[in-house]
Image: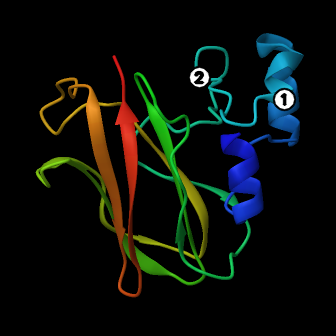
Amino acid sequence: MEILNAKFAGTFVSTYTRDAAASGCLLCHSAAQKYAVMTEMNCTPCHVTAHNSATGTAREISSVPQQYNLYQNYPNPFNPSTTIKFSMPEPDKVQIAIYDIQGTLVKNLINHEEYSSGTYSVNWNGKNESGNQAASGVYIARIITSKFSRAIKMNLLK
């Protein structure tokens, strides 16, 4: 139902990748990954090049978008990690930070770094700035650029 609601709202973005590198990963991860629309393959254990960023550095995943956007994280709820996608139609400095429900900063994922136009994803491993696992609960991911600001709610379950 969540996928249908997102599709009708125009916010659904499939994460299935058809590039040659991902096709090679199907040998390790099986064809079942082909239809996993809410997750991306993490090929780090099998390959030198990963398809899913495990650090705070975002990776570009498509061409130039028409507008700024912060997409709902996936999976959501999550444990232990989640992916946050954002898009920018022009180069800009980006900050993406995670806050708890009381507004306290938990983790800076991207700290005022310059990005060119494009669509990117960044992974949050559920840990705070000290490297400790965050508690179960609702968290807010917020993006701030010079021309755009938006927040989404995320649920961390243990």
Point out the tag, 1 or 2, that comes first from the N-terminus. Answer: 1
**Type of amino acid at the residue the image marks with label 1:** Tyr
143 shown above or below 68:
above
Q: CA distance from mark 1 to mark 2?
A: 20 Å
From the top left corner, tell me how far across and down residue 44 is, in percent: 59, 22
Which of the 4 image quarters holds residue 148? bottom left
State the residue at coordinates (43%, 49%).
57
| The C terminus, quarter of image | top left
Q: Residues within 10 Å of mark 2 (few under 14, many from 20)?
A: few
Q: Which residue is mark 2?
A: 44
Colour scheme shown: rainbow
| The N terminus, quarter of image | top right
Relative to 66, 53 lies left or right: left
State the residue at coordinates (47%, 35%).
82
127 shown above or below 143:
above
Give the number of the mark in front: 1 or 2: 1
Relative to 54, 47 lies left or right: right
State the residue at coordinates (76%, 47%).
4
**Type of amino acid at the residue the image marks with label 2:** Thr
Residue 72 shows up from this direction: yes
Label placed on residue 35: 1
Residue 56 shows up from this direction: no
Label placed on residue 124: none
Closest to the observer: 75 or 50? 75
Relative to 106, 85 lies left or right: right
From the top left corner, tell me how far across and down residue 5 is, in percent: 70, 52
From the top left corner, tell me how far across and down residue 8 is, in percent: 76, 60
Give the residue furthest to the bottom: 147
Closest to the observer: 51 or 10? 10
Which of the 4 image quarters holds residue 128? top left
Which secondary structure lies at badge 2? loop
